[in-house]
Image (cartoon, rainbow, N blue to C red):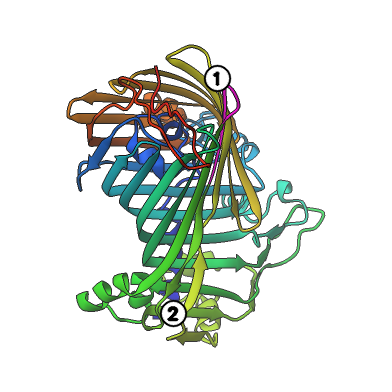
Amino acid sequence: MKRNLQYIILIVLLITSGSVFAQSDMISYGLNKTLPQANNLNPAVLPDYKFSFGLPGLSGFHLNLGQNFTNLDLLTSTDAEGNIDTERILNRLRRNNRISVNNTVNVLHLGIRGLASYTAFSINTRAISRVSIPEEFFQFAVLGNASDQLEDGLLDLNRFNTKTIGFTEIGISHGREILAGKMTVGARLKLLLGHAYADINSFDAQLQTYGNEEFRGDSISMNINEFDIRTAGVTGALFNDQSTSEDIRSSALSNRGFGLDLGATYEFNEKINFFASLNDLGFIRWNESYTNQQTVPAFNYSFSGVDVVDLINGNSISVVDDFDSVVNDLEIAETTGEAFSTSLTGRLYAGASYKLSRRQTASAILYSELYRGALIPALTAMYNFQAGTFFNFAFSATAMNGRINNFGTGITLNLIPFQVVLATNDLASILNPVKGRVVDFRFGINHTFGNVSKGKSKGKKNSKDTIETIDLGID
């Protein structure tokens, strides 16, 4: 039972480690001219500062938690009789109910702006988690095992899957102007250090309940097909009983990989600009010393009920003993010491901006990521007001997580030589948490020096790929 208990603990940790649906960092993208960390989203972005520096513990963090199917207001709603409104809750469920987490801590950032280029060095620690739960799981929990709403009583749970990864990325990026200054291109190379990984790729299970009166049988049966649980890094070390502090430290440093971010911007004319970036192309190779794979064989179990008298009297309950016997008799295959690689979840940003005036810009940004064959999109409309490098303000409205009213806002305020950053991609969840589905917050302090827009510094270039006169800033 010890190993089976570990399975349960792992699944609980996977689900509670992140309660979020894939949330993009749209506001940071909108503040790109004055937020140095926006270069992490698009290496072709050239911030307006000649020099920027973020110290550990000061350069900031981005906390993002959210999901696509409920909120506290829905969970606490009541019907006319004062009971929890389970019908309303079930009606709001989706076929795939997704929760996810995207957390980033900026350990270090250093950016240097050249005449027609920008080079940055950064260290970020990131945690990413995705969980997909089929609606049938909630139906069984709410409706019970004998409801007319369950039709034939067969609940398909095979869309459940989860993936959690924690790692540190050490990256260096370079972006520069080409095509006579009308276009910038950039790339970031990243060394990845994997800390922890856990994955249930495909959980194929069916639960046959009593069903409604037409299909009602005399027992409940559970059928679970073979599935794998993979762990690595710190999680793998714990599963391998390598629980000493030395094992944990070694597991966090022995898993390495590489990543790549690509970006580009294009100035169509004085008013219209296009931009795009492709992030997190890469992999992590998990060291064989700290990997564990559990293969749980297929099994099924049927039970027809429990003797209530035995339950009340505290006597041994046969159905519990029988199920415990079935689980303990499973020949679970355990594999350790085999290295494997996992890919990162790629992200795409693409959009266009229109200059309303010298200080005001309107933008449309499309975001998408591909997770286990499912395309997860978001579309944002954004307004930006920038007063040089002193003050930058952005406001956005995003269609995401089944909502079209995800409002976000953010500012950068330059209090020489300090810059304060405050931003959120879901303002409503902060102002009214009861109705919110997302928790999203960014805070940081950067050291920033120089303003390339002052004096509109120009330089002559001999390269065929650059303009002869380069405007390095904005009015």
Residue 277 appears left or right of 28: right
Residue at the (65%, 74%) spot, across then down: 225
Horizontal and vertical percent position of residue 133:
58, 54
Specify whether residue 27 is painted magenta.
no
Q: Give the tally of numbered discs.
A: 2
Residue at 44 percent of width and 25 percent of height: 428
Residue nearest the viewer, comparing 173 with 447? 173
Q: Quadrant of residue 161?
A: bottom right
Image coordinates of residue 377 in percent, x first then y, are: 61, 41
Q: Which residue is mark 2?
A: 292
- Above or below residue 295? Residue 391 is above
Q: Using the image as rendered, state which of residue 132 and residue 404 is in the foreground.
A: 404
Q: Amino acid at mark 2?
A: Asn
- Residue under the point 26% across and 37% down: 51
Q: Dot 1 surroundings within 10 Å: few (below 14), some, or many (20 or more)?
A: few
Under circle 2, the secondary element is strand
Q: Count residues near mark 2 (Cα–Cα under 10 Å), then give few for <14, some for 14-19, many for 20+.
A: many
Q: Residue at x 55, y 85 (%)?
A: 330
Lateral position of residue 197 relative to residue 252, left or right: right
Q: Earlier in the sequence, mark 1 or mark 2?
A: 1
Query: Residue 270 bears which disc, if any?
Result: 1
What secondary structure do most residues of the magenta stretch adopt? strand
- Residues rendered magenta in the picture: 267-277
Residue 130 in view, yes or no: yes
